Amino acid sequence: MNCRSRIELFCRSEAGEHGRVRAPCGEAPCTSPSAPLPAAFADSGRVKWQRSWGVPYAAPPFGPRRLLPPEPPQPWTGVRDAFVPGPSAPQPGYLPAMTGLLEEAVAPDEDCLNLNVWTPAPGRTGGRLPVMVWIHGGAFRNGSGAWPSYDGARLAADGVVCVTLNYRLGAEGFLLLPDSSSNLGLLDQIAALEWVRDNIAGFGGDPDNVTVFGQSAGAISITALMTMPQAQGLFRRAITQSGAGHHSHPEHIARRVTERMAALAGAEPTRESLAAVPFERLIAADAALGQEIAQATDLTQWGESVGGGTTVLPVVDGVTLPQRPIDALADGAGRDIDLLTGTTSDEFRLFLVPLGIGPRITDQVLHGFLTGFGLDPVEACKAYAYPGATPGDLLSEVMTDYAYRIPALRVAEARAAHGAETFVYEFAWPSPALDGALGACHMAEIGFVFGNLAHPLAGPDAPQGLSDRVREAWSSFARTGRPTAARPPGGGLPHWPAYAGRRSVMRLDDGAASIVLEDPAADRRRLWDTLREAVPGGA
């Protein structure tokens, strides 16, 4: 075999058969065809990694398997190419206003339950490596594990095995159907983690040291996985970026979503009926429902999907997901899992600025939102005010707290009650996109986490040093459960204490601006003291 052109890896399928995948390789000599071999990646010096793309972890979830739990992939004989990413889940794509800010999925198609693996060269492994499994975001309707921003080469060069995956989205993944399971998208993620458990040692990874990390819908998924019986024992650590444990639907809301989406698609709200509908029509029905939710005046009608940013969410069905995740955490679920969680400073500006919504927010609209959230409008406006702020600016600040920061802090508080440490961050580096109007918006940290500073939100002069420190913290956490390791003075981040006690938050910014804050924005946090709370024993 000419190792300059290809390598062959043994991978075990769920059926117990042995096939091989063929993946890119660099110039290292071949040593064993049954072990991962290196490829070359050069940037600021030569580092080595090997990748395998488009590896199936489950069978295509369409045809007779549509709207059913994932099944094992068909075993193959011989060698299967792993040179290119596999198809992404069917999805609508982003609005034109987001063009240039967000990446689009790779070739959406039916055979979408696949994953990608990056691993260091064998000479760098030194035994079993920590494993980091990425679950992408996209409001449970968009996204792909194969976005260029999620390329795991730099993380592999840092000494971890990195895995990214696809899962079912929208109606295909998160409806409440009387004749099928709920949370099919979460079950897909569990199937991928089972694949990691069974196969990752062949890539140099330690199946007993798996960290699941993800952003937005991916982080919401991970918080749910921390509480799901079927996911127990599949990962040891979790990193949740801009997503926590509040965003789920109780059965009555999930049923309303399912019934309305089925009606918009011209079908009955059953698996049998919806499985006969082309996925393009279901995607269109999902988009139409999102518009209806955005225009709804009753803030309780659609639960956590109020505003239309999401339609489907994980369903608290009492079986696959027994409780609302934040309530399960308050009851002690997941306390044995190490957790790093956080948000960006200006999350919601990504959803207001590109769409031109901010200037249309009046004082009356702002006060309506504040009242609907249970806040006193006068007190809230006083706490959130800053010089030159418009009503749209204040709404962005409030929504950042409502949807992201306060839910993340509730997770840390719930875990602290059970003696479980949680490390909390705030990513504060402002994106230069749209002339700086986005601030440190939703997704601004992703390029820094992966070390891929060509991310659209990072801009041309993104600080490499900040990315180095963030990657070091994430990979240190994956190795040890601690985001900062002992370093000489002046190296890396300062000591990062857990949140409990002093409400410590690591503020991540360029240069010396990365500091530990104690109870930042305390006046705003206290406004929510009786709101967005966990309910121990809650359904």
Image: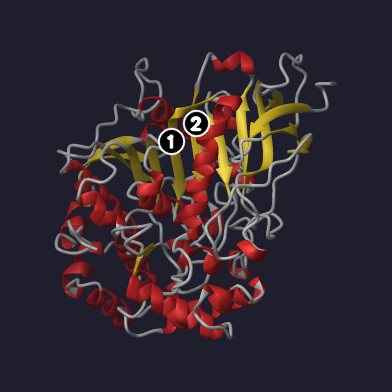
Q: Which residue is at the front of the view, 267 or 287?
A: 267
Which amino acid is tagged 1?
Thr
Tell me if label 2 and label 1 are in contact, CB under 8 Å.
Answer: yes
Q: Which residue was labeled with disc 1?
A: 211
Circle 2: is it few (<14), some (14-19), or many (20+) Cα within 10 Å? many
View extreme (right): residue: 2
Q: Which residue was labeled with disc 2?
A: 131
x 55%, y 65%: residue: 67
Rendering colour mode:
secondary structure
The quarter of the picture where the N terminus appears is top right
x 28%, y 80%: residue: 368
x 46%, y 52%: residue: 218
Q: Secondary structure at mark 1?
A: strand
The quarter of the picture where the C terminus appears is bottom left
Is 112 situated above or below 504? below
Q: Which residue is at the front of the view, 439 or 244?
A: 244
